[in-house]
Every structure is written in structure tokens, then in C-alpha cells.
Image (tube, grey):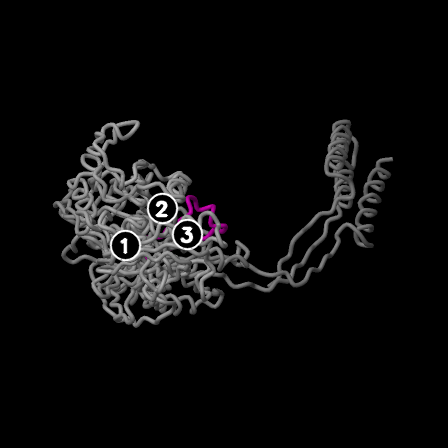
Amino acid sequence: MTDLNLTFAPLLPWPILAALAIAGAIAIILGAVAGQRGAALRALALALILAALTDPSLVTEKRDPQKTIVAVVVDKSESQNFGARAAQTEEARKALDAALAKFGDVETRFVTVTNDASGNDGTKLFGALEQALKDVPPERVGGALLVTDGVVHDIPAKAEALGFRAPVHALITGREGERDRRIELVEAPRFGIVGKEQTIRARVVDTGGDGARTPIAVRRDGEQLPTYSPVPGDIVNIPVKITHGGANIVELEVPPAPGELTLVDNKAVVSIEGVRDRLKVLLVSGEPHPGERSWRNLLRADANVELVHFTILRPPEKLDVTPASELSLIAFPTADLFGRKINEFDLIIFDRYSNQTLLPSVYFDNISRYVENGGAFLAAVGPDYATLRGLYYSPLENILPARPDGALFEQAFRAHISKDGEKHPVTRGLPGAKSDPPQWGEWFRQVDANVLKGNSILSGAKDKPLLVLSHEGKGRVALLLTDQIWLWARGFDGGGPNADLTRRLAHWLMKEPDLEEEALRADARGREVTVERQTLKDETTPVTATSPSGVHQEIALRNGEPGLWRARFDATEMGLWRFESDGLTALVNVGPANPREFREVASTTEKLAPLAEATGGAARRLSKTSDAVTMPRIVEMRDASRYGGSDWIGVRQTGASTLVGVEVAPLGLGLSAMLALLGVVVAAWGWEGRRG
């Protein structure tokens, strides 16, 4: 391939040459008007002089033709697996490969696009197209063919953003009029206060539906909540109570529609992190003792605790006829605290409180009902618990997990974790517990008691129970059979994990999910799911996993550390997974809660049509009423405004080439140019001489 061009390299700037040309032309014109002979020869001489000053050259370029680059972007995202789309895509890819291979001057670049690892960025075809053509000069690009369902999430706003001037054609898979019903989240809270309600705003989108009301089933952590039935398109407010700290998984689901494309978008998942407001604690201190203020100091050090503290300074053995109303500086509001307002407290603590006459039996009954209805009660007892004045010999007997046998150990001992305590989240892994004996300070008093229910997680003197936890109805009870935990707080004999133990104990009483002794948990990192079973049992049963599509599989767990059994596996599907074992259920969402890829799955030509038309291309379906593919003809075209018709699409023939050699032949230099100029000058002189 050879190109011949005429080029100029002026010896003087163009403005000066123009001025010389004008001046010479004026002189010749004036001479001609005056009747001078040889004006034409003078003009020719002037033209030759000016031409010589422009240094004209004939440039011969030798070029190698370059092939036109046509990119074929194949969409293999998750939404392309619905219906016959995957088969249509593969058939179209093969047909394009065969059609473009017939053009000898076309190089085809195939680009396959899948979803990113998170699945939340949707389908991004144009980013992949840019990467595929980044090493190609824009003038070599002959077009881009997109095989997709039309739901693309990175469409440029303007054709200029593509970086090349060539047609873009979209070949759309799927069918016209596809039916799809989905639940769409309009507003979803991320955090909520435990015990309060949060509102989720959602709507039903029913593409191709008849507009009839559609029920929305609502579940929180697997528990069924009231159902709502809005008209498709209307926003509905769904209040959900946050029942516990940590992740509260809320599922919204609509039933399948007849002939629906997929059920994957019929469910939406909202994870609301439950956070506690100020923890309201009632602390009642009984007989004064050296560690009386330890509980108060510990609770007041936490800014999230609202503490109500009363201290009974009167010893239980002092009995007289003094009216109870005169035994305190202010009236002890027993009716409010243990009657009308008892349910406002998150935790009630009795610190060395004995069965005195200050609290009538009816208030102890109220505390029992408070616990059975979901409240939390902690008793740190002293020597009185071993006597008939102890709390056990009161209406609290129904909820206390250990019965005193009348004995009291008053000797040095070190607390240690029991067999059950090694598996229990409250005491497992406490600092200093691994050594034998534990690296904790000594205590000197313990009430001997027999455990009736619950679990002893700390042992003391003679391996007797020291800290007992139990479930009572919907609530929980903790019994500490010593009044000397304050020695750890004071650092006596090296101290101990006072803050860690009491914090965990309070959180267990508050039913924090991370401290449940019998729990099933699941956590997802990308597609890797970790299933964890917390139990006090020696063995555990396999876990049944249910995928978002309803497929069941059994997962065997392996024992890691005491009380913990784990398993890891790669999830094959994105969406909400359910795990069940021993009556426990755990939910985890693999991937984003509501993947962008599945928010809209009906195929469409509307999204890509504006860009395709702006480049001269077209957006068309590969099939309309059936799954059979009808491919348009592909033709090569020179530059045009439109590159498509009813049954054909075109790619731009670029004619690009690479320069391999250049030959330059100057026209204003050498003997021939000089002879031509001299010949004209002599001719003009001779003509003028004949006149003389």
C-alpha cells in the first residue's frame, strides 16, 4: 500500500511569502496596465521564485494495512442464567465468531464479563470493554457488539465517553414481556435500640403483573411477624422490634407469580444491628461489708449504665419496734421499685441482702415473676445465705439455682473454672485461667451449696460451686456464693479478672447472643461461610444447611476449643442461608443483602438503546416470542451515520495502516528547478529585448 502526497517546507514564514506574492502581483499588474510587454512571463517567474521558497516535495509513504478491531462483549453475569439466556448467549457468541471471521481485515476480540466477588456492583460491561481496547488506537476500532440481557449498570452517559467513534450494537437475550415480581427496599435501617422499633420501607414491583395486592411475609430471626398486602408500587412501612443486641435478621418475602422468571428477587434481607440504650440497673446492698462499694464503683464506671442504688445499713440481727418509715433518711420507695416500676429495670442485683423485714414477701414474688417474664437477677451472697435469714428461704427460692447446706468455708482458696465453665462463654478464656492453679488472687469465704439447676461455671474451696447460672422461664439468674470478689478489684494477691468476669456476666444476663451457652452461629466472608456451634454438651449433631433456592445439605462440625464446634464451606449460591441443629437456627446472608444484580432481572432493550443509537448502532432482541435465536447479518461499511437496518448490523471499515517507509523528492531544488527558473527569466529578457 503506497500513498503519494505533496508537502511544503517554506524557507520563509508564510506571512512574508504572502506579502512578497502580493507585492509582486501588484507590480506585475501595474506594468501590464502601463502597457509593458512580458507581464505573463514576469508572473510565471514570480510564481516559480515563490514556489522555490516554499520548498515543495513529493512524499511517497509505504504502509502496511492494519486490521479493524471489533470487540464482542459476552455477558455471563448471574442474571444471564435465567431461562434460556445462557443458551442464547452461547449461540450468539458462536454466530458472531463465524460471521466476523469471514472478513479478512477484521480482528475479533471476545470479552467475557462476570459479576465481581461481592456481587453488589451489578453487571459492568463497559469497564471490561475499555480494558479490552486500551491498547488499540481509536481509529482502528470498528465497533462493539454486546450480548447481554440489557440490564447493565455502567452505561456511559454520552457516546464520547467510549473513547472511539464506531457503532455499538446490543444483542439482547431473553423474551419480550417477561414476568417478574420482586420486593424492593426503599429505606432500611442499619442500627436499632434493643426494645425499640425500627421501620423498614419497602414496595412490591410486579413487572408484567395485573396490579393486584401482593402479600409481604415478614420474619425476624425466623420468627413470623404480621403480614402486609400493599398494591404493587405503593410504599409500605413495616415496623420491626429489635429484640436483642447484635444482628437482627429481617426477611421480607413475596409469593411467586405465575410464569415468573426467577424467585431469587422475591426475598429481601435486612440486617439491623441491635445496640443497647442505657442499661438500667437496680442495686440493693444489704449488710455493710468491706466490698460494699465494689459493685457500685464497677457499674458507675460504665457510662451506659443508669444505676439506682439503695443500701440497707441496719444489721439483720437488730430487731426493735422502730417503724420502717423511720429507718432511712428518705422513704424507701419499695412500692415503686419492686412494684409498679420493676419491669423498667434490665438487671436487679442483691449484694449481701438477707431476708429482712424491709421487703414484704409480695415484692419477692414480684421479683420472681419479673425474672420468669424475661428479667435478669444477680445475687452475690455472704454468710447469711447459709442461715435461715438467707435469700433462699424466701419466695426467691423458686428462682435461685443452689440451696445452701448450712456450711461455710472460711479459708484461703483460689477460684478456678469448672468443667462446664471451660465450655461456657462467660468463663472460657478468662485471663490467667490456663495455669494450674489460676493466676488469680485468693478469697477467704464461700457458702457451701448444692446446685439444683443450671450450671456451675466457677468452683472454689474443695471444688464446691462458686458461680451458678440458670435459666428461669424467659429470664436468667446468676448466684455468686461469695462476697469477696472485691478482693480482685482491689488487686489483693495479684487480683484477678474482675472486670472481664462481671462484664461477661452482665451481658449473659442481658441475653447477648455472643454469650449464649447453647447457640448456633454463622458468618460469611465473601462466599466462605463459617458455621459455629456453641454447646455445653460433649457431642453435637450435624448442621443442616438450606440454600436460598431450598437445597438441603448436611455439614459435619469439628471440635475446636472447649464448647465450640466449627465447619467452613464455600456457598454455591448468593442469598440467605439457613442452618439448623438441635432445634437452633442461624441465618446468614452470603453476598450483599440485596444484590444489585438481582434488583431488576427482566431483559430490556431500553437501557442500551440511547447509547447504541448515539453511535449509529442498534439495540435489538435475539428472540421475541420463543427461545430460538435470530441473528442479524453483519456487513462492513465505510463511515456512515447509521450502521444498522431491519435485519442487518454494520461494523466500521477503518482502513487503518502502519507507516513502514517514506521517500521524499524535493521539487524546488536541483538542476531542473534552476533551469526552469533561468529559462523563464531569459525568455522574459528576450521578449523585452525584441521590443528594443
Sequence-first tag of 3 and 1: 3
Specify the label residue 500 is tagged with.
3
Is residue 657 visible to the viewer in this orientation of the structure?
yes
What secondary structure is the stretch in magenta mostly built from?
A: loop
The residues bearing labels 3 and 1 have C-alpha atoms spaced at a distance of 50 Å
Marks 2 and 1, Cα distance to the nearest angstrom? 20 Å
Secondary structure beneath disc 3? helix
Q: Position of residue 83 (x, y in %)?
A: 24, 63
Sequence-earlier tag: 2 or 3: 3
**For this view, does 133 lie left or right of residue 311?**
right
- Asked whether, in this view, residue 689 is left or right of residue 84, the answer is right
Marks 2 and 1, the one that precedes in the sequence: 1
Identify the residue under disc 1. 601
Q: Circle 2 sits in a helix, a strand or a loop, which is it?
A: helix
Name the mark nearer the viewer: 2 or 1. 1
Q: Is residue 537 left or right of residue 167?
A: left
Which dot marks residue 310? Answer: none
* Local secondary structure at mark 1: loop
Q: Read off the residue under disc 2.
A: 610
Say if mark 3 contacts mark 1, CB within 8 Å: no
What residue range appears in magenta?
149-169
